[in-house]
Image (spheres, rainbow, N blue to C red):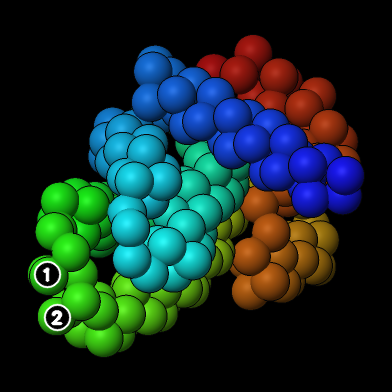
Amino acid sequence: MRRLLSSRSAADTLAATKVTLRAIQTSADAFPPLKSAASAVLIVLELSEKTKSNRKGCAHIAKRSAQLVQDIHRQTKDFGIELPPEVQESVVELRRLLKEIRDFLRTLSNENLLQRFARQDENKRQIAEYSRLLDEAMVHFSINLELSIHRLHLESALTARSEHAAVLAVSKMSESERLQFLKKIRGDVNVGKYLLGFFFFRSLTPELSNQRSCD
């Protein structure tokens, strides 16, 4: 009974995974190489069920491949179809790896009995290598995602700093107030913040309006 329930649970999980991958595959908002990666994983899942040797290892890399694509989509969907360059590189590389795994499993599923026996150890080593490469691909993606987020925050902070400098140029702050404001801006840039000087802007709004009126 337990085995039957476990089998049903695994089948339900696999079905849900395929639904999610198809949604990524057809999404108008997903990065195109990620959609292509989802397509490759759908084939990988199908092929992993047809292999007659190293089935446990094949099932593992198929499951891991599906997990990676879903995780990456979940972490990048807010970017839309234009991912940061660093992240694009990781996704394109993952797509290449998934297509290689797809082709490997396709070859594996077509092996006859003699070929399966002769290549069993070689195939086992290759499956282990693909498992390692998938883990490595996820680490590479995570690092690049963090770097891109940090870069975007820094760019936003620098943009805000330039905008604040323009405000200072037309404001009627005292010299000490200017220095204090600049010190705050530099501190915010150093920690990667980009929501800067809200209250300063609000306090300067009447002065800016008066300045425009004078002009």
Residue 114, given in percent of the width and then of the height, sits at: 12, 70
| Image location of residue 85, percent across then percent down | 30, 53
Q: Amino acid at mark 1?
A: Gln
**Quarter of the figure with residue 31:** top left
Circles 1 and 2: CB atoms closer than 8 Å: yes
- Is residue 145 in view from this perspective? no
Residue type pointed to by label 2: Ala
Residue 210: where, in percent of width, then height? 72, 20
Q: Work out whether 34 lies above or below 157.
A: above
Q: Which residue is depicted at the point 64% across and 65% down?
A: 192
Question: Which secondary structure, mark 1?
Answer: helix
Q: Which residue is mark 1?
A: 115
Residue 68, percent from left and from top: 49, 54
- Res 70 quadrant in image: top right
Query: Quarter of the image containing the N terminus?
Result: top right
The residue that label 2 is drawn on is 118
Report helix, strand or loop for mark 2.
Answer: helix
In this view, 80 is above or below 93:
above
Residue ranking furthest to the front: 113
In this picture, is 115 found above or below 14? below
What residue is at 71 percent from the left and 19 percent from the top?
A: 209
Is 137 positioned to the left or the right of 161 in the image?
left
Residue 12 appears left or right of 71? right
